[in-house]
């Protein structure tokens, strides 16, 4: 696995975050949340810094990161796409919509496109069941998404790359 070189200013910021939580190992989850919002994901190198600062083993940090689904060790795309697979969405064709995203982006769930623009995930429930099936792109919610809409949703963000 390739070793990632972390930006020194971000490492310093991460150490400050740890200090804010008094380098308390009981605050590991809060520190990891802050680290993920700082780096966008939690590669081994970030986990190592956290482990050193909180004086816990890297194995312990890795265990917590891999246990909780809201932590990710894979960088998300600029536009993270999530398809709701809750009951209402599923019954109304969310799986077909997800398959269309996988086909058009040529990635699997949990992956990011090679250009770093899109990542794909499925989730349990967005809480917008009346709009099923629901797709979120970043913070934006797209409701009543049909297979035919997938291409235009991708285009909308592809053209906004910059």
Image (cartoon, rainbow, N blue to C red):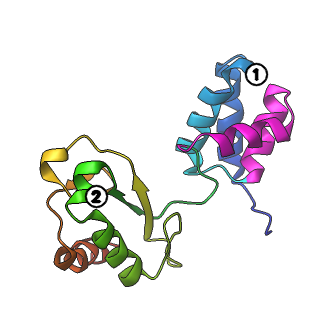
User: Distance of mark 1 from mark 2, alpha carbons?
Assistant: 40 Å
Q: Is residue 69 above or below residue 106?
A: above
Q: Is residue 140 above or below residue 102?
A: above
Please say whether residue 68 is one of the residues in the magenta stretch. Answer: yes
Magenta residues, start to end: 44-70
- Say what secondary structure mark 1 lies in: helix
Determine the residue positioned at 53% across, 78% down: 114
Please name the residue that numbered disc 1 is placed on.
25
Determine the residue positioned at 70% across, 37% down: 64
Q: Is residue 146 left or right of residue 157?
A: left
Is any part of residue 162 visible from this angle? no
Where residue 105 sits, quadrant-wise, is bottom left
Please name the residue that numbered disc 2 is placed on.
90
Residue 11 is situated, as x and y percent measured from the top left of the image, at 71, 43
Q: Please give the label number shown on residue 71.
A: none
Determine the residue positioned at 72% across, 55% down: 6
């Amino acid at each position: 696995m390739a070793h990632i070189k972390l930006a020194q200013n971000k490492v310093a910021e991460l150490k400050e975050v740890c200090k804010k939580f008094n380098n308390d190992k009981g605050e590991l989850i809060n520190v990891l949340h802050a680290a993920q919002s700082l780096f966008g994901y939690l590669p081994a190198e970030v986990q190592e810094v956290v482990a050193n600062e909180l004086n816990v083993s890297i194995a312990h940090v890795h265990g917590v990161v891999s246990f909780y689904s809201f932590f990710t060790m894979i960088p998300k795309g600029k536009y993270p796409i999530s398809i709701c697979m809750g009951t209402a969405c599923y019954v109304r064709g969310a799986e077909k919509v997800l398959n269309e995203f996988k086909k058009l982006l040529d990635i699997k769930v949990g992956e990011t496109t090679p250009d770093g623009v899109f990542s794909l995930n499925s989730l349990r429930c967005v809480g917008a069941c009346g709009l099923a099936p629901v797709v979120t792109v970043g913070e934006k919610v797209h409701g009543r998404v049909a297979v035919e809409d997938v291409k235009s949703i991708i285009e909308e963000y592809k053209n906004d790359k910059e």
